Amino acid sequence: MAEKDLADRTALVTGSTSGIGEATAKQLAGHGAHVIVAGRRQELGDGVVAAIRAAGGKADYVRAELGDAASARELARRALAISGGQVDILVNNAGTAVFGPTAETLEEGWDTTFNTNLKGHFFLVGELAPKMAARGKGVIVNTSTMVGQFAAPGMAVYGATKAALNLLTKSWAAEFGPAGVRVNAVSPGTTRTQKVVGIMGDGLDELGKQAPLGYVADADEIANAIVFLTTDKASYITGAILNVDGGRTAV
């Protein structure tokens, strides 16, 4: 049973209706946090909330597109209303991707990927981090990716958004750290989620073998690292990009 070390905190997790976000939301609830599940698909969000409540946790769902400043501000407004005016933990996990050669990349795919992976996060932090700073504490964790740190053919747009998110992580750590707000990122390697399996198919296991540990992570292994960074056990960690990739970026 998880230690209830987040019992007095509210956590907003974007993109938490499936995959890494869902695993993170459930783990945070297991640590006692009131979790606000945010995502686009109502039926999936309701399912995550129901599972958390059935396990004795506290959760609510907010539908959010999170592709522009307006949607980010609306999500912040609704999360603050649900939580009684205080979000202690923000996990920026919502994300999308466009893959393929540069010459075949459409502007629509570029815009959607950059808006979802960067713009939404940027303006959500702009709404919530100052409120954390005013209280003198708060935690933000961004979900990045290993291909934000090294080149991979066909992943230029996706990798560029995550490389930018890594720099934003450090920038926000510098900006809000003096007021007691910690900002870090987790950089997952190959992870078995429904979405990734749908894209990679049988190639997923082969990709996992490229890491020194030689296998594909499950979502809970990534969520373990995210949740750790939200707890007081990580109290002196900020501005870090924590690689959770089976050693892939080490070789």
Image (spheres, grey):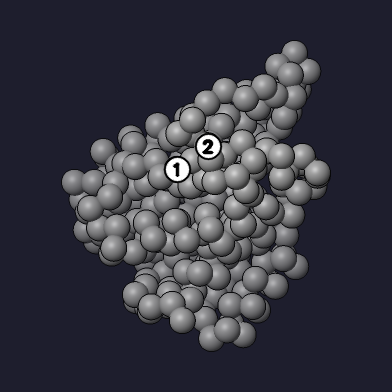
Q: Is residue 98 visible?
A: yes
Could you tell me residue 29's position as x and y percent?
A: 49, 74
Which residue matches tag 2?
248
Asked if residue 159 is positioned above or below residue 20 in the image, the reply reads above
Asked if residue 135 is positioned above or below residue 178 in the image, the reply reads below
| Left-right relation of 119 to 31 | right
**Tag 1's secondary structure?**
strand
Instruction: Choose the circle earlier in sequence order: 2 or 1.
Output: 1
Could you tell me residue 196's position as x and y percent?
A: 72, 46
Which residue type carries mark 2? Arg
Q: At 72% across and 29% down in the image, what residue appears? A: 99
Q: Determine which of the numbered discs, if any, sits on residue 196 in the image.
A: none
Which residue type carries mark 1? Asn
| Left-right relation of 130 to 225 | left
| Left-right relation of 159 to 9 | right
| Left-right relation of 218 to 148 | right
Q: At 69% across and 54% down in the image, what residue appears? A: 193
Q: How far apart are marks 2 and 1 (CA)?
A: 9 Å
Q: Determine which of the numbered discs, if any, sits on residue 243 in the image.
A: 1
**Tag 2's secondary structure?**
helix
Asked if residue 249 is positioned above or below residue 93 in the image, the reply reads above
